[in-house]
Amino acid sequence: MTSVSSVARTGMSSGTVNCDAVVVGAGFGGLYALHRLRELGLSIVGIEAAPDVGGTWYWNRYPGVRCDVQSLLYSYSWSPELRREWRWSERYAAQAEILRYMDHAADRFRLRELIRFETRVVSAVYGEDDKLWTVRTDRGEAFRARFCIMATGCLSVPNTPSIPGLEDFRGAVYHTAKWPHEPVDFSGKRVGVIGTGSSGIQAIPVIAETAAHLSVFQRTANFSMPSRNRSLTEQDHVQFESGFAAYLESLQHTDFGRVPPTAATAPVPSREVQWQRYEELWQEGGGAILYAFPNILTHHGVNDVACDFVRQKIRETVQDPETAEDLCPTGHPIGVKRICVDSGYFQVFNRPNVALVNLRKEPIERFTSGGVQTSARHVDLDALVFATGFDAVTGALLAMDIRGRDGLELKEAWAAGPRTYLGLAVAGFPNLFTITGPGSPSVIGNVIANCEHHVDWLVECIDSMRRRSQQTVEPEEAAQGEWMEHVADVASRTLYPEANSWYLGVNIPGKPRVFMPYVGTGYRHTCSAIASEGYKGFLFDGAAKRS
């Protein structure tokens, strides 16, 4: 077999490449995995479908796209040098700046030389005899590795709903998650945007600035908080660094959107106290409303007041009363869908060139050559934008043909919903690690922090295996089952399951309705305790039979 060092990064190999580990994906998690595994002295191949690093930030270039986590937090924590070298320009960074940051990190730590770009994994098959993974790509290449690390991202497979007649539409069609790299000019055009989740809420105000007319097709109204975005100063960076140790410590206990252990016994504040606190957070900007009270995601009495507060803000902002009511979210608590952070979203509906189409009142029947036919009227369009999100968390993993022990397909193993141990590994799939996989905090909170934690854990596990001359690791069936029962139980004691959200996969037809993220606290302590107890719940070298 050809060694990894003898194969050009973007070339075609003449044979199978042998390496210690394959890392699939060059987003934040994949880049850090490459860095840590190389530090460990392993030979590594990174595989990335895009022409460059960035993950979801490479593809998502739609107008107005920016992160909903503050820039100083949405950064790598593991490199003091990187923190000293980089200065964010805004409180909430735009896509272009985030991508420049990732470019800088990739160059700073010489990571590009490890990655084969414009290469997509089609299959990963575990071999019982040699205990190696064979990873094949769409370039006809094959890589054999002891470890397979899936850093494929939770928001990387775009979802386009199936609506009759799309092939008949003569105008331009875009998806926010597959935006062209060249500028798109909507000047003088009648534009339709389908979807009012995070990407739609960010794109709509910017598209409205140039479009002759913008029709916003809304099925479900969403809660959104103003970002109050601003430029960052050197003092902001200095102040953040001074409190950095405390920030790292806070990650051990809780994070954005997770339910603290005090939630069950926390008192219910009066409506007046709640209202005052929500007003303070509204003026501060960002999604910190979910920090307001410990039981906001478990107690209807608290959550209902927060919902009333945001709905009142919408009514105060939007001048047309009927439009304002259509924009008021109903039917789900605040925060149980990832809360949006916007820059002028509700204000945009005061523009004369913007109209809301409430699909609850007039659903889309079909696309036509010149626009969209609803149950009530025809909306003329020159361009169409799908802001319809992703097949989240599991989409990228299930798009590959992954086969573990005894030829077990991941699609089969997850037919009734994803099952992992800690969101890190899957029973029956030795030496396969999933960064921010289902059953972990994953998309709840700061995904970069979650990626770093998973990479650090799996690298320590691999290092421990090397010291003990162990070849394989996988979860016990029983431990995996108990963990997934715990994940479901924690979610059931919150308000999260009350929303038809992509956390549950309900946006994808036929996808099992399973709440995928872990929303409890103490996750990092649990992972550390399992490792310190000899990786309790894991099997090494098939030392025990699976039940």
Image: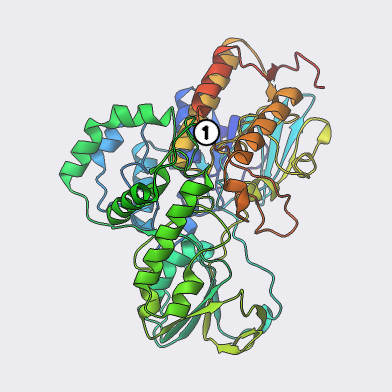
Front one among 88 and 32: 88
Q: Mark 1 points at which residue?
A: 264
Side of 442 relative to 410 (left or right): left
Side of 150 relative to 274 (left or right): right
Numbered circles on residues, count: 1
Q: Which amino acid does label 1 sit on?
A: Ala
Q: Residue at x 50, y 31 (%)?
A: 521
Side of 63 relative to 20 (left or right): left
The percent position of residue 409, horizontal first and vertical second, equals 78, 40
Front one among 15 and 166: 166
Front one among 515 and 434: 515
Q: Which residue is drawn at 41% across and 75% down?
A: 207
User: Mark 1, residues whose alpha carbon is within 10 Å: few (<14), some, or many (≥20)?
Assistant: some
The percent position of residue 24, horizontal first and vertical second, equals 58, 41
Side of 442 relative to 132 (left or right): left
Q: How is the image coloured?
A: rainbow
Q: Which residue is drawn at 65% across and 35% down?
A: 489
Circle 1 SS class: loop
Q: Is residue 325 visible?
A: yes
Q: In this view, does 380 lie above or below 194?
A: below
Q: Is residue 54 above or below residue 430?
A: below
The percent position of residue 512, horizontal first and vertical second, equals 73, 49
The percent position of residue 68, horizontal first and vertical second, equals 40, 52
